[in-house]
Image: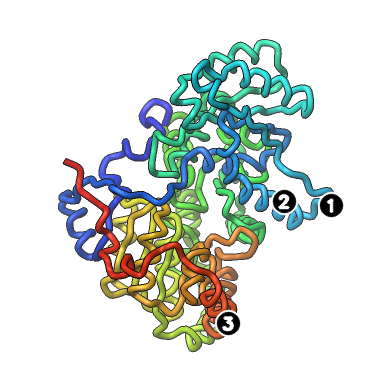
Amino acid sequence: MSNTYSGIRESRPHTFNDCGGSSRELSSEFGKRCLKAADRTFSQGLQCQQINSMSALMSLEEAVFIAHSPQGCVGCTSMATDIYRVGQAHRGVKLIKNPRIIVSNLDQRDIILGGEGKLKEAIEYAKERYHPKLIFIFTSCASGIIGDDIDAVAREVQEDSEALIIPIHCDGFKSKVCASGFDAAFLSISKYILKGEKLPKQEGLINLFAPVSISYKDQLEMERMLGLLGLRANYIPFFSSLESIKTIPAAEASTSICKVFADEFMKELWENYEIPFSHTVMPIGVRNTDKWFRGVAGLFGKEAEADLYIEKEHARILPEIEKIKQRLQGKRVFICGGTGRSFAAAALIDDFGMELVGLETPTYDDDAQTDIEYLYAIHKDFIIDIANMQPFEQINLVNRLKPDVFIGVPVWSARLGIPTTHVLDMKRPTMGYDGILYLGNKIADQIENPGFNKKLAKHARLPYKKSWYEEDPFKFIKPLE
């Protein structure tokens, strides 16, 4: 990864983040390599890579996180902080604590004269107050524009510091694909913690990479399934530690719960440490859970054991899924989520006999093309919006398509009175075989009890004129010259 990949997802061939239209037309153009790069002439907010870098690591034990940025840049950490606090409660922690976040608070003067002095002060403050093992420094748009040399600052301070100081280059303007933030974090982990040092292999140890948006129930389910194959999970980096990260090279194999989380890092682990990996799908829904589990089993030659387990699980859950299907058959659904999770959820709804009418996801690439081609076998043509956020397009599409339920971050669509549920649920199960049952019942309950959203629609206004709903939702997407 450090030798072959820049950490910017747009640098990968055939990666698009600004397009929309018929799924069949987009897929056909992409398959012929005729899909043209485009940009939005109007944009309503992006999720930047800095927050993904921070959220990926914010639950690490004995760590301090310094955002070398203006104060506003850490506003988005409120969600990751909430997840961290809830995660502690779910794991039986009695004294709940916040992550240790320090912001260097760059201001107008620093933009002109540089902010390295403030960064040094923040590092010294972190050492004196917390005595951590790890200090992560996250760049921002502001520090990147200034050109502050955080690597030089880290080297200088490291000389008399017991804590390991790790710079992470996640300037928000470098990439419009927010998953680049994950890559920036792993690039630094590789450079400053692993350092190419190889370890003796631990039999049955597998690296299980998990982002912040995985609930504790999901973690337990994934670890349980791996345990059935005689495997022990090194669950990283969420609720992990420095020692667990240092153990990465000792694993016999790697896999990821999320399709776009650590995918590039797993390639590096194969190239540098000869650790094979499974990169299939996110284990949401029957088909995807089967595929994810068989992918891991194949790394260890345990396909027969996996098939036996899958057979038993199908016997247990398929009758229950059939009951849920009776409540959801024929319901029309719009899905919004990350690249891995949105396509996984689109496969999930087929378990319940639902119809996919629209899908919003941040990136279209070769992996997405594979998922789209699979979805053709189970769904008719549907609308795709390739967008990092852009709620104005989502609301136009949802209002136009009028689905029976919206699956995804519900803030905007709930105000249209449409039943909504969350597939990015960091507090409840969504994955594995038990997660299928929970999600199905949750979706059905929302459709059958839409009162809250209907009342919300009467009292909460969306910031769009009526004329916008009559416009082409993709009118601001223009091909690059």
Question: What residue is at 54 percent from the left and 20 percent from the top?
Answer: 150
Q: x and y percent of residue 71 in the render? A: 60, 35
Question: What residue is at 57 percent from the left and 79 percent from the top?
Answer: 455
Query: Is residue 249 in sight in this rendering?
Result: yes
Give the mark nearest the N terminus, 1 or 3.
1
Between 46 and 163, the one lying in front of the other is 46
Residue under numbered circle 3: 451
Of the 4 image quadrants, the one containing the C terminus is: top left
Q: Please tell me whether mark 1 sits on a helix, a strand or a loop.
A: loop
- The residue carrying pointer 1 sits among few (fewer than 14), some (14 to 19) or many (20 or more) residues within 10 Å by Cα, namely few
Residue under numbered circle 1: 94
| Dot 1 amino acid type | Lys
Between 307 and 57, the one lying in front of the other is 57
Rounded to the nearest whole Å, what is the CA distance between mark 1 and mark 3? 36 Å
Rounded to the nearest whole Å, what is the CA distance between mark 3 and mark 2? 30 Å
The answer to the question of whether label 2 and label 1 lie on touching residues, with beta carbons closer than 8 A, is no
The answer to the question of whether label 1 and label 3 lie on touching residues, with beta carbons closer than 8 A, is no
**Quarter location, residue 31:** bottom left
- The residue carrying pointer 2 sits among few (fewer than 14), some (14 to 19) or many (20 or more) residues within 10 Å by Cα, namely some
Q: x and y percent of residue 372 in the render? A: 30, 62
Q: Please tell me whether mark 2 sits on a helix, a strand or a loop.
A: helix
Question: What residue is at 56 percent from the left and 65 percent from the top?
Answer: 430
Closer to us: mark 1 or mark 3? 3
| Dot 2 amino acid type | Arg
Above or below, comparing residue 115 to residue 142 in the picture: above
| Dot 3 amino acid type | Gly
